[in-house]
Amino acid sequence: MRCFYILVHGTLSWRTELAPGDDPEAFRPAGFYCHRYVLASGDDEAKDKAFDRVRRNLDKQTGWIGAGLAVLDLQAEEVVEAPMHKVLKPDNRGHSFYTD
């Protein structure tokens, strides 16, 4: 097993339009960036593990995916081996959202 750093880009496609009476200022980002450190035997397994953790964490924080409000597409912008001690740090569970 090796430690990998994965920079993840997530794109959100919103399934629903705002209903009458909904807040037009509701936060509906177009996407986000985040990163994860994972233990894996290779690049593909590292991406799969990172994507799973990002998807679960985003839905836990926002509920958008589980409620069917948006479709999430994840891509690995960067996959590189990292020093093993990086995986011992707690996850940075934040997302850097963008609107356009």
Image (cartoon, rainbow, N blue to C red):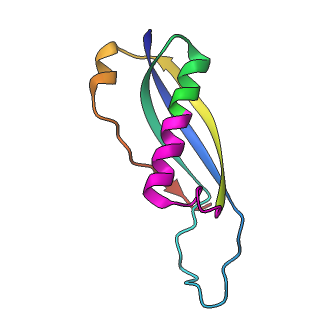
The correct choice, above or below, for 30 with respect to 78 in the image is below
Q: Give me the residue at 63% from left, 36% from top.
A: 75
Does residue 68 appear left or right of residue 37 in this picture? Answer: right
Picture quadrant of residue 22: bottom right
**Magenta-span inclusion, residue 90:** no
- Which residues are drawn in magenta? 51-69
The secondary structure making up most of the magenta span is: helix
* Nearer to me, 90 or 11: 90
Does residue 1 appear left or right of residue 21 in this picture? Answer: left
Q: Quadrant of the C terminus?
A: bottom right
User: In the image as oriented, which residue stretches furthest toward the bottom?
Assistant: 21
Residue 64 in the image: x percent, y percent? 56, 60
Q: How many marks?
A: 0
Q: Give me the residue at 45% from left, 53% from top.
A: 60
The correct choice, above or below, for 54 with respect to 23 in the image is above
Q: Give me the residue at 51% from left, 60% from top.
A: 63
Does residue 13 appear left or right of residue 55 in this picture? Answer: right
The correct choice, above or below, for 14 with respect to 49 in the image is below
**Magenta-span inclusion, residue 64:** yes
Q: Give me the residue at 71% from left, 75% from top.
A: 17
Residue 46 in the image: x percent, y percent? 53, 22
Residue 15 in the image: x percent, y percent? 72, 65
Q: Quadrant of the N terminus?
A: top left
Picture quadrant of residue 42: top right
Residue 13 in the image: x percent, y percent? 69, 58
User: In the image as oriented, which residue stretches furthest toward the front?
Assistant: 66
